[in-house]
Image (cartoon, rainbow, N blue to C red):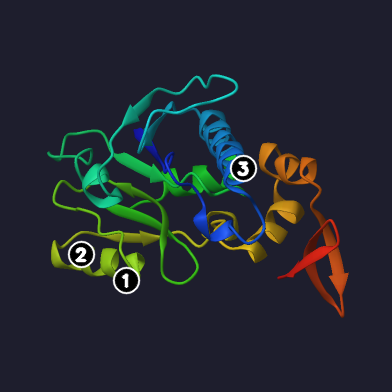
């Protein structure tokens, strides 16, 4: 199985702008990427980073990097199976900071011509494609689109319900989940920048230098 990890190297995590500077967002995105790559490695697969631009990393990564500056949908489509005998292709987003080897192994082992781990808000956080006619459509509620595409081509769909794979890190409130459930570089990156959990009226949020963001 080929495993692709799309990564927006040019402008990562813009919705975290209220709490992180541009340089901090870039460093945090790279930390999440490393965590995702490590989880894939632990399952026994060698991931490939599908990056929008050349990566500038403080420390090298072992995974090969393919640069494709096209939007996500055509960049992924170009690498999906073209024949039934081709190897399956998995696509795992780089911002799944809570991903673990166990969660990914469940996805990779799921049956069906297409297996999807949906994200919150009807997104598609990770999927495995075995059917040669399936193509992705990542705009808007992509899980709903992918479910419809699967039905149109007569393919079997497996839906993998996973908290760790459904939690992509996009908004400031999502950082709570990283500090609570993250295990490696991503939570360390936040703590190095002064973030910590803060409970307020029964809700847990994040605090940094006197500023709080609720979950």
Q: Earlier in the sequence, mark 3 or mark 2?
A: 3
Residue 32: image location, x then y, percent: 58, 41
180 sits left or right of 18 in the view = right
Q: Would you say residue 51 is visible in this rendering? A: yes
Instruction: For marks 3 and 2, give the CA distance.
Output: 34 Å
Q: The residue tagged with tag 2: helix, strand or loop?
A: helix
Q: Is residue 41 above or below residue 16?
A: above
The residue at which mark 3 appears reads as: 28
Farthest residue toward the bottom? 201
Q: In percent of the image, x 59 and y 23: which residue is there?
A: 58
Mark 1 vs mark 3, foreground winner is 3
| Quarter of the image with the C terminus in it | bottom right
Q: Quadrant of residue 192?
A: top right
Residue designated by label 2: 149
**Residue 176 percent coordinates (x, y):** 72, 60
- Determine whether the residue tagged by mark 3 lies in a helix, strand or loop: helix
**Residue, x 20% and y 48% (percent of image)?**
131
Q: In the image, residue 128 lies at what x, y percent?
A: 34, 47
Residue 166 or residue 11, whichever sits in front: 11
Q: Residue at x 57, y 46 (%)?
A: 22
Among the 4 quarters of the image, the one containing residue 115: bottom left
* Inter-mark Cα distance, 2 to 1: 9 Å
The residue positioned 33% from the left and 65% from the top of the image is: 142
Element carrying mark 1? helix
Give how far apart the Cα atoms at labels 1 and 3 are: 29 Å
Category of crowding for the residue at label 2, using alpha-carbon neighbours closer than 10 angstroms: few (below 14), some (14–19), many (at least 20) = some
Looking at the picture, how far across and down is residue 42, in whole percent? 57, 30
Residue ID for mark 1 = 144
């Amino acid at each position: 199985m080929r495993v692709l990890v799309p990564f927006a190297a040019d402008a990562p995590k813009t919705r975290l702008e209220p709490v992180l500077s541009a340089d901090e967002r870039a460093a945090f995105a790279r930390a999440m990427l490393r965590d995702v790559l490590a989880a894939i490695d632990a399952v026994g697969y060698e991931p490939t980073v599908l990056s929008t631009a050349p990566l500038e990393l403080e420390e090298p990564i072992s995974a090969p990097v393919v640069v494709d500056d096209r939007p996500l949908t055509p960049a992924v489509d170009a690498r999906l199976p073209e024949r039934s005998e081709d190897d399956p292709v998995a696509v795992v987003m780089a911002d799944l900071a809570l991903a673990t080897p166990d969660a990914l192994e469940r996805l990779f082992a799921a049956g069906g011509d297409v297996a999807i781990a949906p994200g919150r808000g009807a997104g598609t956080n990770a999927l495995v494609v075995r059917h040669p006619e399936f193509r992705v459509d990542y705009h808007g509620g992509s899980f709903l689109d992918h479910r419809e595409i699967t039905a149109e081509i007569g393919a079997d769909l497996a839906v993998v319900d996973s908290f760790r794979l459904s939690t992509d890190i996009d908004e400031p409130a999502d950082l709570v989940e990283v500090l609570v459930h993250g295990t490696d570089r991503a939570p360390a990156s936040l703590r190095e920048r002064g973030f910590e959990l803060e409970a307020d009226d029964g809700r847990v949020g994040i605090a940094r230098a006197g500023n709080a963001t609720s979950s």
